[in-house]
Image (tube, rainbow, N blue to C red):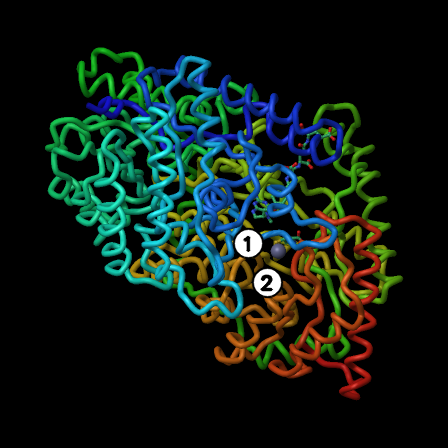
Amino acid sequence: MTTPFPAATITGYPRIGRRRELKTALESLWAGRIDTGEFAQTTRSLRVQTYHRLRELGLTEDYAIPATHSHYDHVLDTALTVGLIPSATTGTDFDLGEYFALARGTADRSPLEMTKWFDTNYHYLVPELEDATTFKAHPQHLLTLVSEARTAGHRVRPVLVGPLTLLTLAKTAPGTATSPLERLDELTAVYLDVLSILSAAGVEWIQLDEPALVTDSGEYSDEELAEAAARTYATLTSALPHSRLLVTAPYGSLRAGLPALADSGIGALGVDLSPAVRTLDPGYVDRLAEAVPSSVRLVAGIVDGRNVWANDLTASLETLRSLPQPEVSVSTSTSLLHVPHTVADEPALPVDVATWLSFAEEKVTEVEALAAALSEGRQSRESAFARADRAQRTRAESTTVHNPAVADRTAALRDHDGRRGAYADRLAAQASLDLPVLPTTTIGSFPQTREVRRARADHRAGRIDDAGYEAIMRAEIDRVVALQEGIGLDVVVHGEPERNDMVQYFAEHLDGFATTENGWVQSYGSRCVRPPILYGDVSRPTPITVGWSTYAASRTELPVKGMLTGPVTILAWSFAREDISLAESADQIALALADEVADLEEAGIGIIQIDEPALRELLPLRRVDRPAYLDWSVRAFRLVAANAALATQIHTHLCYSEFGEIIEAIDALDADVTSIEAARSRMEVLADISEADFDRGIGPGVYDIHSPRVPSVAELTELVDSALQSVDASRLWINPDCGLKTRGYAEVEAALANLVTARDAALARIGAAQPTAV
Ligand SMILES: CN1c2c(nc(N)[nH]c2=O)NC[C@@H]1CNc1ccc(C(=O)N[C@@H](CCC(=O)N[C@@H](CCC(=O)N[C@@H](CCC(=O)O)C(=O)O)C(=O)O)C(=O)O)cc1
Ligand SMILES: N[C@@H](CCS)C(=O)O
Ligand SMILES: [Zn+2]
């Protein structure tokens, strides 16, 4: 008889550490400051401390705690565990040299490609499947996790990415004949090996995450995925007599996948019941009530794993009680990977805002309180429920949340579509910019040096005053402007040295947002971000970027491009409100940014870029939800520039994604110039651009800024030439793929010099010298 599934659990936990211990350990290992032995010891104590803390917070039952640690990325870990990526192991762990070579590359090997994990701001490493790939079980590190936890007194639940999700996330190497899903049965056999080895080691519950089943927008239809799931899970469960499977479906709702999983023989089904999912699919709870048989433990992810609002425990308990299944477990909707560790580390948050929040630790206590209330009644956790009720009430009534002036302004927009004048008129008006053919520019940020970061930290800590800080930033702007002039770029930028992050910086200067000191969330590997908390109506008390841009303009005769982060990206990379729609929040942010555009124009800045790298990321996972999203997101972007003069050239920039699917929406942004990531995919986006009849300025990135390599003039020339095959020279801009903040000055200077040389060579070939207006 297997141990029953725990009444309270979570889908996963942040692995970076409350004090970013994993980041420190990784960066120390990579810099040679510690060896692999010390790294192993540090990460082991991080894991064990996490288990102890989770038990203190209420996850006391066997298998309540999932073992979700990863040194870098959980998709990489699973791909190595089943041999989708050939791996070397040490007997207790992956071979770390090989592991980090895959994750980060080496002098002579490229790293695996990185891309966004579903609709989140977390990036996973994309495994590459070849016909020659032979799957094979490598469960050593899982056995280590299990045994080290046991030694420390915990029975933890090993977690893998499920076979369907792993295959749908993998890409096929060039020349591969079979599609990933054709390899499913073969892969299932190897998962079975891994699960059997864990089972033989006495593990009774194992978790497989299958978020692919909440999507229908990839290569496979919902029905195809559901059919495959039914087959795979029937195979896996029938061959595991001593252990049971929890399959989770985070980030959305199951449709065809629901009966497929519910009837496959699995022991428990984890579902996402977060407010965002239930808003998109209001019938989900009823479908679950009907479809999940009593033989399957329903693990209700009613505590939101992605957002930071304190749970409405009273409403959640009511939902849980409405489920007809005799026993329901309480869990988080997704892994808590997406939220910071604890509100306790944020003493500087406004007191009222702090009481409305739950980060990872607080969410574990919410799970525990709901599970206890479900079995023993609300009175067993009365103080938690009373606190939660108070948070709901004070937030709803708060004057810091609701600003009638902002509400009036968005209400007045009504059917405003944000369209500027006709492009032909804008083109004529922008001729005054007097730009050359194939103009060169950068995307905005220049290297964030140690000195710049230290100045920011010193300013924050009060070690330098405002004047001292401003002097350091101005010196950096002087350097960046002089560098661009020296290299011969046509449109220059101030370099963004004052920005800790392209979203957090704006949030720090807008009313309605709170920012954190220690609210770090893993973005990829050792890199983290601190997503701002959007808690109230948004307005802009004073200009944000105008001082920096006008200072740069005072240092050069060249046109200076002002730099803004767009409303969709600010929203996507923040914790959003749930009391109003995303569309309304986007409009509010857009109007605040429109004020900034007006002030930049007034100050004489004639070119303004509005970055939207997250436009693709927020695209809903189900096709049916996409048109509404694209409608409000495009509209919000357009509102930012709606009142800009015809002569003001509006740029936008997109990166971190493949854009083929949304090329029409990008066109609809109606920017005068769009710079877009392209170098890594060897300009694949150009085919989409030609197909969409994109007829305004376009700058497909020719310099891959994700790599420390300096591209040669020959490589850049090849990319410029390939762009010229698809885009008329009068519309083509020459620029890098993205901002340069993560690079060093030496490589940036050399790469940009090569970029200008490649442009000059292209100009000589096409024999164009007349100015163009785009
Ligand atoms: C473009 N990307 C972004 C995403 N999301 C965002 N919100 N922002 C983005 O830019 N998503 C998609 C991609 C993800 N890419 C990256 C790339 C790089 C990082 C990264 O390097 N993160 C840094 C932290 C950056 C930051 O906020 N820096 C602050 C604070 C720095 C800090 O840690 N300070 C120390 C003290 C330092 C000192 O004394 O010198 C401290 O507070 O302890 C700043 O520079 O002011 C990282 O280190 O992880 C993230 C996403
Ligand atoms: N302007 C920003 C865009 C990054 S996506 C930068 O250059 O870093
Ligand atoms: Zn970018």
- From where the camera sits, is residue 414 visible? no
Q: CA distance from mark 2 to mark 1?
A: 9 Å
Report how many numbered discs are placed on residues in the image: 2
Q: Which mark is residue 652?
A: 2
- The residue sitting at 60% across, 61% down in the picture is 653
Q: Is residue 506 above or below residue 417?
A: above
- First reached walking from the N terminus: tag 2 or tag 1: 1
* Three-letter amino acid code of the residue under disc 1: Gly
Q: Callout 1: few (<14), some (14-19), or many (20+) C-alpha neighbours within 10 Å?
A: many
Question: Image quadrant of residue 602?
Answer: bottom right
* Three-letter amino acid code of the residue under disc 2: Thr
Please name whichever residue, 488 or 68, is drawn nearer the observer in this view of the structure.
68
Would residue 357 appear left or right of 71 to someone viewing this image?
Answer: left
Q: Which mark is residue 566?
A: 1
Which SS class for mark 2? strand
Question: Image quadrant of residue 52?
Answer: top left
Q: Which mark is residue 255?
A: none
Question: Image quadrant of residue 753?
Answer: bottom right
Would residue 347 appear left or right of 365 to someone viewing this image?
Answer: right
- From where the camera sits, is residue 624 visible? yes
